[in-house]
Image (cartoon, rainbow, N blue to C red):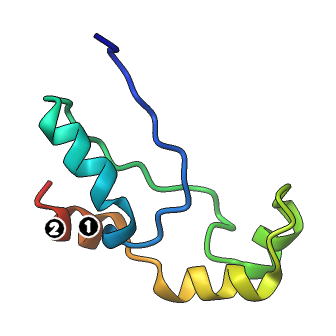
Amino acid sequence: RISVVIIDNTNTTAKEARPYVEAAKQHGYEIQVVEPDTHWRYNALELFQRNTHNVPLESIIRMLNRWQNSDEFKKELGL
């Protein structure tokens, strides 16, 4: 009975998001994949400087290296 559920997590690949997507499908939710649209979204140093969770630069670089854009993401998840 909740109209909107937002999963704000670091899902860099469809595999990481699959459990959320499957749960949403099971409960009849419409799924929307929203990707950041800032001009610095792929800039590791900028992301490192802006992050508030003390994520190391090396971790951010690894996340960027495995990043799937929303088209790939949706295709792999059947959305």
- Depth check, mark 2 against mark 1: the one in front is 2
Q: In this view, does 76 lie to the left or right of 54?
A: left
> Residue at 69% of width from left, 67% of height from top?
40
**Label 1 near label 2: C-beta < 8 Å?**
yes
- If the image is split into quadrants, where does the N terminus sit? top left
Quadrant of the image occupied by residue 16: bottom left
Q: Is residue 19 left or right of residue 58?
A: left
Quadrant of the image occupied by residue 76: bottom left
Q: Which of 24 and 35 is in front in this view?
A: 24
> Residue at 36% of width from left, 60% of height from top?
17
Quadrant of the image occupied by residue 59: bottom right
> Residue at 28% of width from left, 67% of height from top?
73
Q: Nearer the viewer, residue 18 or 76?
A: 18
Label total for image: 2
What residue is shown with label 2? 75
Residue 4: % across, % down = 37, 22
Label 2 is placed on what type of residue? Answer: Lys
What residue is shown with label 1? 71
> Residue at 26% of width from left, 49% of height from top?
21
Graded by Cα atoms within 10 Å as few (under 14), some (14 to 19) or many (20 or more), the crowding at tag 2 reads few
Q: Which element is circle 2 on?
A: helix
Q: In this view, does 64 lie to the left or right of 56?
A: left
Q: Tell me the distance, in whole angstroms, between the alpha carbons under discs 2 and 1.
A: 6 Å
